[in-house]
Amino acid sequence: MAGRLEGKVAIVTGAAGGIGKAVSEAYVAEGARVVINDIDAGAATLLAKELGDNAVAEGSAIGTGAAAEAVVGTAIEAWGKVDILVNNAGILRDRMTHKMSEEDFDQVIQVHLKGTWACGREVIKLWRPLAKEEKKDEAQSGAAPHRKIINVTSPSGLLGAVGQSNYAAAKMGIVGLTKSWAKELGTLSINVNAVSPTALTAMTEPLIQNPEDKAKRLARFALGRYGDPEEIAPSFVFLASKESDYITGQILCVDGGLVI
Ligand SMILES: NC(=O)c1ccc[n+]([C@@H]2O[C@H](COP(=O)([O-])OP(=O)(O)OC[C@H]3O[C@@H](n4cnc5c(N)ncnc54)[C@H](O)[C@@H]3O)[C@@H](O)[C@H]2O)c1
């Protein structure tokens, strides 16, 4: 099925590689126009070029209010609106807690938790007045359109993880944002869900370099393996599409049965 996101404008943060890239490609294939944000501006520009007229690159470092304004501003300048926000940008600074610096903690919290909050706040400020007007007109114009925020959490955010106290705290915080925003915004037809993925990417490849670590890690998956980013992207299409209009506040584990 194609065209499920026809006419929609999406922002994907951290979109130049891994899961964000696969999501951006799937969104364009489904008819959306996409802002490809990534701190690696060169890679973002390259991907946007590959995707053609339906993509534009943006190079802000997610984690501040100013970056959120810039990324939303790019969508407005290019296409005049935003319908879908995917808060995907992320980093790891894994260390046992006794060895973790304040910087390791702050950076991870800033990119994941504050970045998700700041980009979410920016689209929420944009969407609330629009959605309120549409709700007033609903009786005449039919059901108001849904807008979608898709956050990215992690098995570490659901279960905790050794060496990832910073990351697990940020990702569990993202679950809190997801559920709180779902409750704040549902009556305005703004759906807020999260995906908890596992995929082989630049983030996870270093974790399975050593054969012993690899065997231990893969044994935790019911399906016995990491997914490809292309196996994760369909869940983001679903959560952005009309098919998920009655789903909000949920965490969808697309993880080969790691969290059961
Ligand atoms: N791969 C997995 O198994 C897995 C598991 C659980 C959660 N996740 C989450 O999925 C998301 C994507 O991860 P991935 O595996 O594709 O990783 P990745 O490293 O392949 O991609 C992350 C992208 O984010 C970009 N980025 C980093 N900091 C940024 C910033 N401040 N602003 C903008 N862009 C920034 C990077 O340049 C990179 O392109 C992350 O939120 C990650 O925590 C991944």
Image (cartoon, grey):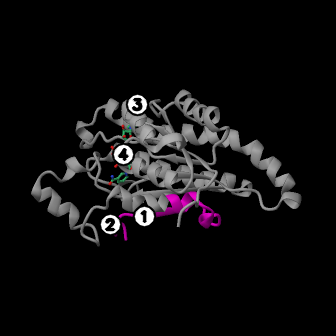
Residues under labels 4 and 3: Cα distance?
Answer: 24 Å
Residue 258, labelled with which disc? 2
Residue 253, labelled with which disc? 1
From the image, state whether disc 3 or disc 2 is nearer to you: 3
Contact between marks 4 and 1 (CB within 8 A): the answer is no
Q: Is residue 242 magenta?
A: yes
Residues under labels 2 and 4: Cα distance?
Answer: 17 Å
From the image, state whether disc 2 or disc 4 is nearer to you: 2
Asked which quadrant contains residue 17, the reply is top left
First in sequence: mark 2 vs mark 4: 4
Q: Which residue is mark 4?
A: 167
Residues under labels 1 and 3: Cα distance?
Answer: 29 Å
For the C terminus, which image quadrant? bottom left
Q: Which residues are magenta?
A: 237-260
Residue 41, labelled with which disc? 3
Asked which quadrant contains residue 145, the reply is bottom right
First in sequence: mark 4 vs mark 3: 3
Whether the residue under disc 4 has CB within 8 Å of ligand 1: yes
Determine whether 171 is above or below 98 in the image: below
Q: Residue at position x 36%, y 66% from top?
A: 259
Residue type at tag 4: Tyr
Q: Is residue 31 magenta?
A: no
Where's residue 246, x and y in %?
64, 67
Residue type at tag 3: Ala
Q: How many marks?
A: 4
Contact between marks 1 and 2 (CB within 8 A): the answer is yes
Circle 3 SS class: helix
Q: Residue at position x 38%, y 62% from top?
A: 231
Circle 2 SS class: loop
Circle 4 SS class: helix
Q: Residue furthest top?
A: 66
Residues under labels 4 and 1: Cα distance?
Answer: 17 Å
